[in-house]
Image (cartoon, coloured by chain):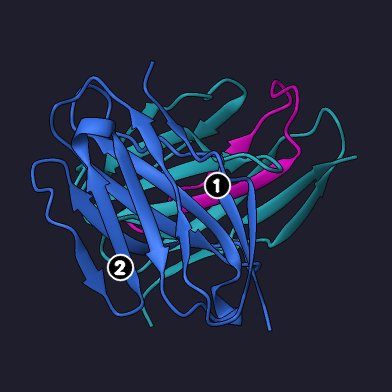
Amino acid sequence: AQKVTQAQTEISVVEKEDVTLDCVYETRDTTYYLFWYKQPPSGELVFLIRRNSFDEQNEISGRYSWNFQKSTSSFNFTITASQVVDSAVYFCAPSLTSGTYKYIFGTGTRLKVLA
Amino acid sequence: DGGITQSPKYLFRKEGQNVTLSCEQNLNHDAMYWYRQDPGQGLRLIYYSQIVNDFQKGDIAEGYSVSREKKESFPLTVTSAQKNPTAFYLCASSLLAHAYNEQFFGPGTRLTVL
């Protein structure tokens, strides 16, 4: 089965702490893309980052960074120096290249950043 | 400003009634999608459309119908055949229906069946 596991249901941190959100996925595809989306209380999902499966170079974009390891099928997302505005639900979503095009969404991790 | 609009924001329906959710985009995207989100859950794909006059069933299409007569519009009808329609519905679009493309989401419609 192709699925995504976000084992952390809810995380609370104090402002300025770093926080890492975990994502483990299963897929039969050898080529795919990995996304992280943020869902603030307003409801709409906002695109954060994209990673392809054939390049394991990890990157940093502002306060966001990600660690992709194909061997363990993990795609973890880190927010550095968290802020209250980072409070939201975060979804990991592999995007498959075979068969019917679609994302596979995890159940999300709710992040609460306390002032 | 370019984006996706969904209306209404909140919708109440009596059992046995059909209801149509609106989704409009002015991003000039070819692909559009409808998702359903239940409390504490991820998003599940209902229908998607890669191009005008074409659409495909997603994972949970039963009890729903769509049309794509115009590039910018992708309305979703929740029919009386949908056994448990109370949920949060999100519309999205992407430049193309390709795994590489990020999706842009609307603000959602919260449907409650009374």
**Residue type beneath disc 1:** Gly
Chain letter for the cyan colouring in the rendering: B
Question: Could you say where residue B28 lies in the image, as x and y percent from the top left?
Answer: 26, 64
Residue A45 visible in the snapshot: no
Q: How many marks?
A: 2
- Residue B27: image tag: 2
Q: Toward the viewer: A26 or A44? A: A26
- Residue A9: image tag: none
Q: Toward the viewer: A107 or B45? A: A107
Chain A: drawing colour: blue
Residue A41, quarter of the rendered image: bottom right
B103 vs B75: above or below? below
* Discs 2 and 1 lie in a common subunit: no
* Residue at screen point 36% across, 77% down: A63
Image quarter of the N terminus of chain B:
bottom left
Question: Could you say where residue B77 lies in the image, as x and y percent from the top left?
Answer: 60, 38
Magenta residues (range): B69-91
Q: Would residue B47 appear left or right of B62 to someone viewing this image?
A: left
